[in-house]
Amino acid sequence: MQRKWSSGRMFLFAAVGSAVGLANIWRFPYVVGANGGGAFVLIYVASMLLIVIPLLIAEVALGRRGGADPISTMTTLARESGASPRWRAFGWLAILTTLIILSFYSVIAGWALAYVPKMLMGLTQSGVEHIQAEYAGLTSDPIQMSLWHGVFMVITIIVIARGLHRGIESAVKVLMPALFLILLGLVGYAGFKGDFSAALAFLFRPDFSKLSFEVVLMAVGSAFFSASVGVGAMMTYGAYLPQSVSIWSVAAWTAVIDLVVALCAGLATFPIVFANDLSPDGGPGLVFVTLPLAFSQMQGGFVVGLLFFTLLFAASLTSAFSLLEPAVLWLRTKFQVRRARASWAVGLLVWVAGLASVFSFNIWKDVHLFSGISRFQSSTIFDLLDVLVTNVLLPLGALMIAVFAGWQLSTGMLRQELVPGKATSLFAVWQILIRYLVPIALAAIFVGSLL
Ligand code: TRP
């Protein structure tokens, strides 16, 4: 039998740590602003409630029931419920996907890490050109980028090698409260020093004319990417969940905190961007150029900049734990490999795989594997991996979880995990969502994003 989390709260820290990451801080606020503000937020909240939370519940419940890594869990559960042993494929898909995500996630997280010393050395005290040159210099230098990507992986590996209690729990116990404090501090600073009302308008003024089928797909897709659902990470964390903890409440809290953090990240960054007449950009440009620029023009920008990149680094680190743990647990379970050895082996493999993403920004910038397809004409390997994960692997994984939990597993077994003793209408609602709404919505994302 596996070890367990020390408490429900520890699971919550780890699960929120997994969910809150780069996607919340640099992607969500921008996507909201560009896609209808409050109207988008409404759809996002609805997809959290109706799709993401039911999926999280299912994934964690499967994990706790199976009590092992995604491959072993699916094998056991398929056997127990008389389903086809082919369901094990979900486990393979999950482990492959977590490792692919980690390979490029770690590259960007490496930038966040690199910016901590850059801030300390006074990046915000230098001029506009210097800030732009610093970013260009980092991304065009394969050696520097591989090193930071390597340092980030080594930190992740060390934590995972120390195990559930001495590693993940010790880390999230410190990092999550720190993360919330920093975030609150940044929102407060932005409220005082920035243009808060412009940010509020950008994030919340509903513009229903911007809503379209694509925007709805984007909202659903972002919601479940942000909650780390569908790739076996939450299943693995669920395997360590003590039987006494209620899955409903931890799943709901994880999703709610993830949402609140994303909104706060918007309230921490956009007031500063608008107060300095900078344009809200999406992705790397916003975080690594626009924000340092804004910080450089503000009183206290040095400290705020330093805190911001520390926050970004901490948030991506706790996400990375949940991306490395499933494969490590699998090696331990299947081949009795020692934890430390498994962590270093998988971590090293991920680092090497990540070099493809590192090179996508410099020496392989002009390598376009699918240049024949107009949509991918100028996509680098990094871009392709991102599309593969977000549009194909994640929706597919989530769809498999929904179908398996909704249609294959016996209701009795699910009730044991979800409603010990009590018959509840909550369970009935969940079952309807996971059987009908969730698979249909996921199939729509899957088809919609391929077209
Ligand atoms: N939720 C993470 C973020 O917001 C990214 C992510 C997506 C993830 N799927 C995951 C993290 C699975 C861990 C496990 O940045």
Image (spheres, rainbow, N blue to C red):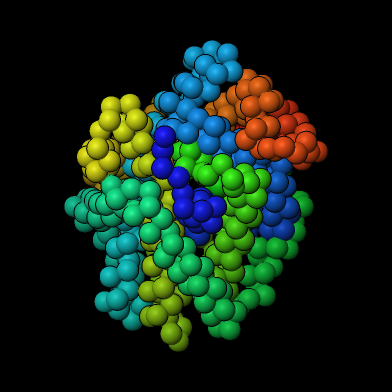
Above or below residue 2? Residue 272 is below
Residue extending farthest front: 421
Residue drawn at the location 34% of the way across and 30% of the way down? 333
Above or below residue 56? Residue 396 is above
Above or below residue 10? Residue 392 is above
Left or right: where does residue 264 sit relative to residue 437? Answer: left
Which image quarter holds the C terminus? Answer: top right
Residue 425, image x, y percentages: 80, 38
Residue 383, image x, y percentages: 41, 40
Residue drawn at the location 55% of the way across and 52% of the way down? 8
Q: Return the residue nearer the eye: 288 or 348.
A: 348
Residue 249, image x, y percentages: 65, 50
Q: How many marks?
A: 0
Residue drawn at the location 57% of the way across and 14% of the way down? 83
Left or right: where does residue 335 sit relative to residue 405? Answer: left
Residue extending farthest right: 425
